[in-house]
Amino acid sequence: MYQYYIGKEEKTFEEIYKSIDNNNLIFSNDSFEPQNANATLNFNRCTFSMVSFHNIEFDISNFSFCVFIGCYFKSSKFSRINFKNCTFIDCGFYDTMFENFEFFYSEWNNSYIKFENIKNSIPSEYNYRKKFCKTMAINCIKAGNMDEYKKYFFESMRAKELNYKAIILREEKYYKDNYSNFDSIRYSVKFMFSKISGLVWGYGERISNVIYSIIVVLLIYAGIYYCTNDITNVKNINLESSIYLSIASFFNINIGYNFNSINLKVISITEYVFGLVFIGMVVTYLFRYIDSREK
């Protein structure tokens, strides 16, 4: 991290209290006091190392190309603050609210803010929103906070689907100029598969969706088997037997029943394929869950 300190002059917040523009400075092991927050300040290419921002309300200031290393944000509120092109490294954010502030092109390393404290200030542009949420999700999972990880993850997927939708409709000038009718068709397919992925297994993050989907598949095939009498060793199939037969076909278990017609055999094979797919989903989810807990 030497590059963040070289060529900069070290100062304290008391020394810059009446200085509006501050360039190429270092603030280390200091505390940002409420009196500083009452002024409109501009920081350009400054480094904040082990600085505490505690119990302050900060309004209308600019931080451009600044770096925050090991800083502590606690019980504070930031409004209309510009954090464009800033870098946050190993920072902690606790009960800190952010409203109407900008942080385009910002970098976050081992730092994250709770989703509820920042959701209204996440960039509305689809690509920036997706990138920011994905970065935050990765940092949350590194910190072992699975609840916050899922909030950011699902928001990133939502941003991606909104981007797909905008490409499909091509109502805005940017999308008209940069995407063709063929792109609309291509992204329609992507949008459809993304929605199916979210519905069937929650993009790999919701095991409950997988269980519900398995139950639906079993019941659909059970209904098909219930409506046929073309099964060896079965004269009059009832509801319980059809469900039992559906489960056996799903998990490829030989229970002595054979389908006589080619159509039923094909249907049984498709259910077996669905079974393989869903078992793969369960295994993938368990692997990702265990892997995330080990980090």
Image (cartoon, rainbow, N blue to C red):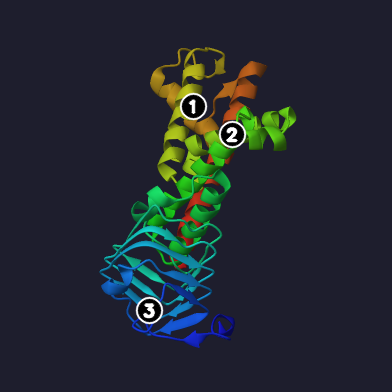
For image coordinates 33% across by 83% down, the residue present is 14
In the image, residue 52 above or below residue 11:
above
Q: Quadrant of residue 148?
A: bottom left
Q: Position of residue 216 (x, y in %)?
A: 45, 28
First of labels 2, 1 by sequence position: 2
Query: Mark 1: which amino acid?
Result: Leu
Question: In whole angstroms, how far apart are the C-alphas of marks 2 and 1?
Answer: 45 Å
Instruction: Evaluate whether residue 157 shows in this view.
Output: yes
Secondary structure at numbered mark 2: helix
Q: Quadrant of residue 149?
A: bottom left
| 160 relative to 286 in the view: left or right | right
Q: Position of residue 57 (x, y in %)?
A: 28, 64
Secondary structure at numbered mark 3: loop
First of labels 3, 1 by sequence position: 3
Query: Mark 3: which amino acid?
Result: Val
Determine which residue is flagged by label 1. 245
Q: Position of residue 166 (x, y in %)?
A: 59, 34
Quadrant housing the N terminus: bottom right
User: Depth-wise, is mark 3 or mark 1 nearer the camera?
Assistant: 3
Q: Quadrant of residue 59?
A: bottom left
Determine which residue is flagged by label 2. 166
Secondary structure at numbered mark 1: helix
